[in-house]
Image (tube, grey):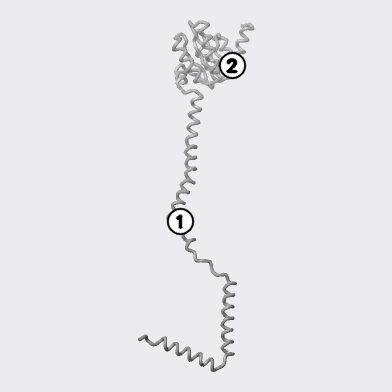
Amino acid sequence: MKINTAKVATIDEVKAKVASTTTAVVTEYRGLTVAEISTIRRQLRTLGADYKVFKNTLVRRAVEGTDAEPMTAFLEGPTAIAFVEGDVSAVAKALRDLAKTSPKLLLKGGVMDGKALSAKDLIALADLPSRDVLLAQFAGALASPLRTMASLLKAVPQNFAYGLSALLDSKGGPVASASAEETEPAAETPAGVEEAASAASDDAAADVAEVAEEAPADEVVAETETTEASEDVASEPAE
């Protein structure tokens, strides 16, 4: 069967979308107005998904032999497909919420990484936290042990300082050191001063000896007697 140019363009478009993403969500839009479909398209575009109406036969031709082929099981009735390049859980959540306000919008299934997704799978994906929330939770899980380790590393020098302070206090601390310094003996007389004093004493003794040798013997005897008399008087008890 010969395919016209418009159909060839549609097949090529679907092939390009399949090549650029591994995830697609198939919906049925029976009964939705053009305005409602446009609203869904604008909302999904902000989440990184391209939502568009396609003919089932052309989609089957486009995905044949590709990883997206499992989604052909859902190509029944009026079909609009969201090719997802962003967060698939966010797209599934948006479609689920839109289906609640517009019951004519039906989530039929899809494909992700070559595997078919049922309608229940899409609802499960919609219940998952968004990619940003998951990344924040993952970052928090990583940061928690790092914060704990940082606290432990900070506590080590603090505990060491406390222990050192307690040890110094038990040994007397800085006060004992200061007391020891205060009770140190006075500085010793320099050696030069001692030698000078000793020399002076020796000289004086020599002078006395010289004078004694030069004095007459009778003077020495007299002086000796006088000294002995003085000692006798000093030794007698007072009356």
Question: At which x and y percent is residue 147?
Answer: 48, 37
Q: In this view, does 139 lie above or below 119?
A: below
Neighbor class of circle 1 (other Cα within 10 Å; few <14, some 14-19, many 20+) is few
Q: Is residue 46 above or below residue 55?
A: below
* Residue 68 in sight: no
Position of the N terminus by quadrant: top right
Q: In which quarter of the image is residue 218?
A: bottom right
User: Residue 149: x percent and y percent?
Assistant: 48, 40
**Where residue 22 appears, x then y in whole percent?**
55, 20
Furthest residue to the left? 239
Q: Which mark is residue 175?
A: 1
Label 2 element class: helix
Camera-side residue: 190 or 125? 190
Q: How many marks?
A: 2
Tell me the SS state at disc 1.
helix
- Badge 2 amino acid: Lys
Single out the mark in the foreground, 1 or 2: 1
In percent of the image, x 47 and y 21: which residue is there?
A: 125
Give the residue displayed 47% in from the left and 35% down from the top: 144
Near-viewer residue (166 or 149): 166
- Write down the residue under mark 2: 17
Q: Which residue is drawn at 48% across and 32% down?
A: 141
Residue 204 showing in the rendered view? yes
Q: Which amino acid does label 1 sit on?
A: Val
